[in-house]
Image (cartoon, rainbow, N blue to C red):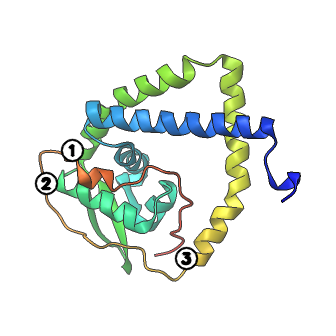
Amino acid sequence: MNDDDRLTTSEHEIWRSYFTGTRELAAHLDRRMRREAGMPMTYFEILGLLAESPDRRMRMSELAAASLSSSSRLSHAVTAMEKSGWVSRGPAEGDRRGWVAHLTDAGLTALAEAEPTHAATVREHVFDALTPLQVASMAEIGRSIRDGLSGVCASARAEAAGTDVSEAGAGTGAGAGVEVGVEMEEIDTGMDCPLDGSE
């Protein structure tokens, strides 16, 4: 192994700082969302994506890609939110193989109630902690990293093409909220390449 196979000391310090900081922030945000808003960040992100979609509906494959989730992970999350009455799921019109997730009125209310906790946490640990110049630099850096990964994720989706988008567990029902327990813990909040390229 030569020096080109390793990060330099400076590169290692920068990478560890970035990697550790973002993971600690994500973990803290997720804990606070669970404690104060009654949902993990995964659910908050899914509800937000549905709220921004036409008629508050998205195909499951599109929702998986947008939320950077695997099909099975998304299906698990949607099933849990169906039990809370936040999301409903049904066949896509004109496509027997496709499924659509729909944000219910109860889900929209839950999202609105969770938004203050999310905003306060992000503002406290990101925007209030950085100068305007640092914020602008962070935005530029984030875009550059995402642009660099776009081809990698496209390749991952291509490799997964032909596998079914998991719609297992589709059903209906309402509950008193999402229980904070094993069901939530099984939803990984890591950032994966979305593997769902088709339904």
Dot 3 or dot 2, earlier in sequence: 3
Question: Badge 3 local density, few (<14 within 10 Å), some, or many (20+)?
Answer: some
| Residue 95 shows in this picture | no
The residue depicted at 17 percent of the width and 63 percent of the height is: 172
**Quadrant in the rendering for residue 9:** top right
Residue identified by numbered label 3? 160
**Quadrant in the rendering for residue 75:** bottom left
Residue identified by numbered label 2? 174
| Residue 110 shows in this picture | yes
Question: Badge 2 local density, few (<14 within 10 Å), some, or many (20+)?
Answer: some
The residue depicted at 51 percent of the width and 74 percent of the height is: 198
Looking at the image, which residue sits at the far front?
1
The residue depicted at 17 percent of the width and 45 percent of the height is: 177
Q: Label 2 amino acid?
A: Ala
Q: Label 1 amino acid?
A: Ala
**Quadrant in the rendering for residue 83:** bottom left
- Foreground residue, 49 or 2? 2
Residue identified by numbered label 1? 106
Residue 105 vs 130, above or below: the answer is below
| Residue 61 pos. (x, y %) | 45, 67
Q: Measure how far apart labels 3 and 1 are at the Cα level.
A: 34 Å
**Front label number (3 vs 2):** 3
| Residue 54 pos. (x, y %) | 42, 53
**Front label number (3 vs 1):** 3
* Dot 1 and dot 2 residues touching (CB under 8 Å): yes
Instruction: Pick the quarter of the image with the N terminus.
Output: bottom right
Q: Label 3 amino acid?
A: Ala
Residue 135 vs 144, above or below: the answer is above
